[in-house]
Image (tube, rainbow, N blue to C red):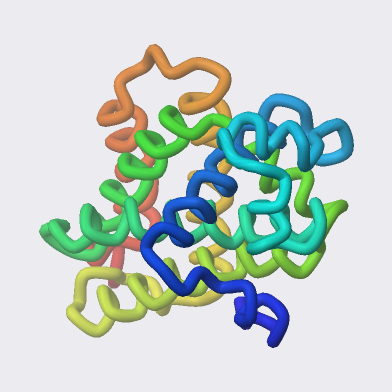
Amino acid sequence: MAQSGDERDKAPRTARGERTRRALLAAAAEEFGEKGFHEGSISGITRRAGCALGSFYTYFDTKDDIFRALVADMSGQVRDYVAPRIAQARDGIDAERLGLLSFLEFARGHKEIYRIIDEAEFVDQAAYRNHYESTAARILVRLQEAAARGEVGAEPDEVHAWAIMGMNVFLGLRFGVWDDSRPAEEVAGIVNGLIERGIGASGRD
């Protein structure tokens, strides 16, 4: 997501400043994840971060501002956690298994992400859409690359990408947030069987 001039002006200029900003974002994740956007407060964020109220306004203008930054940051965290694991895939179909597996792992360690992203639909529609549209775009690129290597039978379409993302989102909710007792590897393996039989190269005539 592009930054405005004001957001760039508030970007940390030192390592210490970056640590403070990261602490505020982590505290905001806790505050909004526990209380929601409307009940969460700037004072609650600074208290959790262990910093002065003035430090908040060094990097953010409003509660909306830090929430918007948090949505973009959490989306980036998911991307950065999943990408190196997908890079280890045997092929394009295995990449989707590893994508779901790593997302389940991430969701289990960051259960607040669902409440934060869901509230973004009503607090910041642009950030909400960007989260899902950018995720689906990355999946589509992976599928297209797999098709070029002959690993995917169907001609990759945006519908395939959104379908896979949709499965991952709700599986993360069911087996990451609501109940994380079932082995993530088992869940990812079952879903990968569906994907392989649906768009795998073996399905081509």
- Nearer to us in this view, 51 or 83: 51
Q: Is residue 96 above or below residue 144?
A: above
Tell whether 151 sits left or right of 128: left
- Give the residue displayed 81% in from the left and 63% down from the top: 125
User: What residue appears at the point 32 percent right and 43 percent down from the top-left corner?
Assistant: 102
| Residue 102, above or below 153 | above
The residue closer to the viewer here, 137 or 111, is: 111
Q: Position of residue 11 (x, y in %)?
A: 56, 73
**Figure quadrant of residue 10:** bottom right
Location of residue 69 with respect to 2 vertically, above or below: above
* Percent of width and height locating residue 15: 37, 63
Q: Residue 21, position in %: x, y? A: 53, 55
Q: Nearer the viewer, residue 109 or 45?
A: 45
| 70 horizontally vs 127: left or right | left
Can I make out residue 28 in this image? yes
Q: Is residue 194 above or below residue 145?
A: above
Q: Position of residue 101 (x, y in %)?
A: 32, 40
Image point (57%, 36%), residue name: 49
